[in-house]
Image (tube, helix red, strand yellow):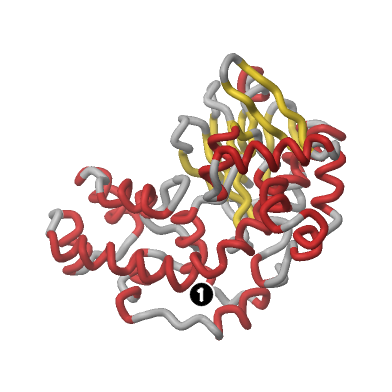
């Protein structure tokens, strides 16, 4: 049982991550390849990774309990990779000692050997291209479907329902959330808050880490695992609204400024603003101005449309 102890301040600081984290999902995908999990069997059989990725399997076990520095929560792969490569020697030493069997290669990582770190970089790049990059649309579809559901629970039934539904057999005991997990663990939030992050590749018990903003990160299985997301997921909505406008609606399950929206989708600021304006006229998006910033967010009507696709 994983017990998370909330203060009153923590209850006010529960949020859902705005996007999947590429390197965190990479670690989960490498773990999924090694698990005897019926949901992922057919998916795993068709994966062909280059030889350069083999060292990752020394670091990441089927339980996904590898070194924490390998899966930072980052906006994109390159940013996350920079964080991995700049991990301090002390952190690398502590995490590799904690989680891995010592080898000449892991000793090289601890000693900051240039060739050892180049090997790790090649392994991460190869695995990202083979496991994450080609599946990113489906990864985001699974992630945002869970996020939309979680937000609807928050608005309709409250925090209790949104958190207890993360995994079966969970419950509240006063201000302590007891999540069904195959191990005993206590976590004190102490005012730091909690960030929820559903993973399309993970099917085990909830996992915890530290979010870059200082809150506790709670990683749990997304409602729909990746192999059950159809490759053409979202095409119906795209046919109705247009592919870019449908992508805008999916992204706005979390508040975004116009510039953030443009950056996430790789479109111009003018295009992002126009798409948001059209969706707002249809009652699917609301827009608020705070100072000079303009923030957009999906409406309940938009969520219903998104969940119906």
Residue 123 picture location, percent across and down:
32, 69
Query: Left or right: 130 with respect to 194?
Result: left
How many other residues sit within 10 Å of disc 1, few (<14), some (14-19) or many (≥20)? many
- Residue sitting at 68 percent across and 72 percent down? 231
- Residue sitting at 58 percent across and 37 percent down? 195
Query: Left or right: 68 with respect to 207?
Result: left
What element does badge 1 sit on? helix
Residue 182 picture location, percent across and down:
61, 56
Query: Left or right: 151 with respect to 135?
Result: right
Q: Relative to 122, say whether 154 is above or below.
A: above
Q: Relative to 199, say whether 218 is above or below.
A: above
**Which quadrant would residue 187 be assigned to in this image?**
top right
Query: Left or right: 113 with respect to 62?
Result: left
Q: Nearer the viewer, residue 26 or 107?
A: 26
Residue 49 picture location, percent across and down:
41, 79
- Residue sitting at 81 percent across and 31 percent down? 158
Q: Nearer the viewer, residue 101 or 219?
A: 219
User: In which quadrant is the C terminus drawn?
Assistant: bottom right
Q: Relative to 84, say whether 194 is above or below.
A: above
> How many numbered markers are drawn?
1
Residue lying farthest to the top in this orientation: 291
**Which quadrant would residue 115 be assigned to in this image?**
bottom left
Q: Relative to 208, say whether 285 is above or below.
A: above
Q: Which residue is mark 1?
A: 33
- Residue sitting at 86 percent across and 56 percent down? 308
């Amino acid at each position: 049982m994983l017990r998370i102890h909330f203060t009153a301040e923590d209850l006010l600081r529960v949020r859902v991550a705005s996007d999947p984290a590429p390197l965190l999902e990479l670690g989960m995908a490498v773990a999924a390849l090694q698990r005897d999990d019926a949901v992922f069997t057919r998916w795993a059989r068709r994966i062909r990774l280059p030889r350069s990725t083999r060292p990752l399997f020394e670091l990441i076990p089927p339980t996904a309990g590898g070194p924490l520095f390998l899966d930072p929560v980052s906006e994109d792969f390159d940013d996350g990779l920079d964080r991995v490569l700049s991990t301090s020697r002390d952190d690398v030493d502590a995490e590799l000692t904690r989680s891995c069997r010592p080898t000449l290669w892991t000793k090289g990582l601890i000693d900051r050997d240039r060739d050892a770190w180049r090997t790790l970089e090649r392994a991460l790049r190869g695995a990202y291209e083979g496991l994450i990059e080609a599946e990113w649309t489906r990864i985001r579809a699974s992630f945002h479907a869970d996020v939309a559901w979680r937000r609807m629970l928050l608005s309709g039934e409250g925090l209790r329902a949104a958190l207890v539904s993360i995994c079966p057999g969970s419950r509240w005991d006063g201000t302590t959330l007891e999540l069904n997990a195959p191990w005993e663990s206590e976590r004190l939030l102490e005012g730091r808050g909690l960030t929820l992050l559903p993973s399309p590749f993970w099917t085990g018990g909830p996992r915890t880490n530290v979010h870059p903003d200082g809150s506790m990160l709670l990683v749990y299985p997304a409602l729909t695992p990746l192999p059950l997301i159809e490759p053409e997921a979202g095409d119906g909505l795209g046919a109705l609204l247009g592919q870019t406008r449908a992508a805008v609606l999916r992204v706005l399950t979390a508040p975004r400024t116009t510039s953030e929206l443009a950056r996430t989708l790789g479109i111009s600021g003018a295009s992002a603003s126009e798409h948001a304006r059209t969706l707002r006229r249809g009652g699917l998006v609301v827009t608020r101005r705070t100072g000079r910033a303009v923030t957009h967010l999906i409406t309940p009507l938009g969520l219903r449309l998104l969940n119906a696709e």
